[in-house]
Image (tube, rainbow, N blue to C red):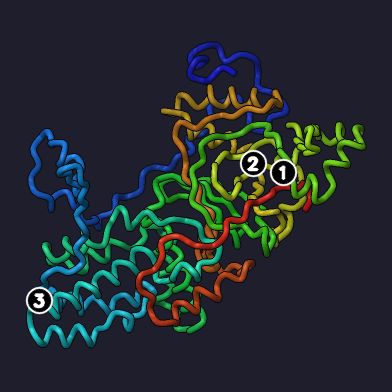
Amino acid sequence: MTRFRLIFGTAMGAALCATSVLAQDNAPENLVPPEPAKVTEKLPDYRNKAPQQPATPSVDESFDDIRTSSREIVQQLPVYVREWSVPQAKKLLAFIPTVEAEGLSPADYRADELSAAIANGPGTTLDETASEIFVWLVEDLRDGRTPMDARRQWFVVDPDPDVLPSDRLLLTAVETGDIAGTLTALNPVSPDYARLKEELARTTDPAKRKLIRANMDRWRWLGRDLGKQYLLTNVPEYQLRLTVNNKIIKNYRVVVGKPGRTSTPQLAEMVEAVIFNPTWTVPQSIVKGEGLGAKVLNNPGWARANGYKATKGANGWVTVVQQPGPGNSLGLMKLDMPNEHAIFLHDTPAKALFNQDSRALSHGCIRVQGARELAMTMSMLGNAANRDELPAIQQEVSEITAGREYTRYPMAKQWPVYITYFTYGVDVNGNLTKFADIYDRDAPVLAALDAPRQSDRARQTSEEVVEIVDDLQTS
């Protein structure tokens, strides 16, 4: 294969394959919307809080909080109690009622206890009480209030505690005195979160308020900022969004996992490449458990017609691989996003399934309508340094698709992909919508929000990883 950087600037070659629905005679339109207005609310800048560093740091300084002495490594421990003045503590007390607008309960943050500490004046009690309440607010606003055991099949590890550690935020707040600003800056930046917040302020229906609060909390389970460009699937919506600068530039219908063991888990991964004309190595649960291996070996004509090749090892182990082609169970493309669940986004020959309203039908992976268009778009946006390079990439990918040979097309600019589960939120048409709770994942979240606040929450789930065995053509 000739990479586009080698052919760019040369003759474009033969006309694009007529079978490709993506080929265009003219240069493609610019898919990327303009940059949105800059966010004026800034996060704390920890760099300004550190002592002035020399232009060329020493070895010890390069390791920040890690110091070496006599072959021992000593790491500075975070400090979670700081000295509070009465005016600062009063600012914290005034902030507590405002969290109701973020879908949190002010009753969780011990306002009476803080008031009593303020009345007693500066000292150890005020320092410890105010510091602990501040850290609780940080944890809930930054990470979400729902404990991990109530987040069913949630395998995303939120990066925010590493980027915005609680002890640094505490230090920033007491040094600057900007208690409210430090805490408010932790809110998710997605406009979808802002819409939920607006709706929460309008509605008085208790059940609706609880559902909105649960889904606002789900936004906090993710990173505060998802990035300038990403793919996002909301499983209950059965839609995939390609988003750039907070604008959906394309959405696609999807088929997701059936309820039960094959339900689609929630993940945050990176798309590293586009696989054109993929092969499908059939899982042993199907080769052996469903008898496909014996069928392929005993019916060579049927196997050839369906693109299956089988090999049998000396130990009797049968391996079945479906070859590239329009009948392949993965269709003509998949997005390579390595993860321990073996989840990915892919094409399918079973196009009729996209016409159904309820599309929880797969073994767990996500089938995408218009997958070839998505593959072309990701190839271009993932590799073009500028708009002028788009036609050459389009030409190359069209030739690859027409050739029907397995091809891994790396993406120089890898894209985040988020597989989420929102049962109330902004749909792909911009409307606030309630989605069916197809996997019954709302109940534990709602119960957790009604229960007393849980401290010392885990950052990672202890749930079992269920390796997905996708995907048969029609089931």
Q: Secondary structure at mark 1?
A: loop
Q: Which residue is mark 1?
A: 348
**Amino acid on which the number 2 mark rests in the picture:** Ala
- Which quarter of the rendering shows the N terminus? top right
**In 3D space, how far apart are the residues under numbered discs 1 and 3 (Cα atoms)?**
62 Å
- The three-letter code of the residue at mark 1 reads Thr
Q: Identify whether 274 is placed above or below 133.
A: above
Q: Which mark is residue 87?
A: 3
Neighbourhood count class around disc 1 (C-alpha, 10 Å): few under 14, some 14–19, many 20 upward:
many
Q: Mark 3 or mark 2: name the one nearer the start of the chain.
A: 3
Foreground pick, 77 / 382: 77
First-in-chain label (2 vs 1): 1
Q: Residue at x 60, y 62 (%)?
A: 236
Q: Which residue occupies 17% across, 64% down?
A: 173
Between 429 and 353, the residue placed more toward the observer is 353
On screen, residue 393 above or below 52 = above
How far across and down, in percent of the image, does residue 395 sit? 59, 23
| Coordinates of residue 22 in the picture (x, y in percent) | 63, 32
Spatial separation of the CA atoms under disc 2 and disc 1 = 8 Å
Mark 3 vs mark 2, foreground winner is 3
Of the image marks 1 and 3, the number of the one nearer the N terminus: 3
Tell me whether circle 2 and circle 1 mark residues in contact (CB < 8 Å).
Answer: yes
Horizontally, residue 253 falls left or right of residue 305, namely left
Residue at far front of view: 70
Q: Is residue 246 or residue 371 the one in the foreground? A: 371
Report the residue at 26% width, 69% height from top. Answer: 135
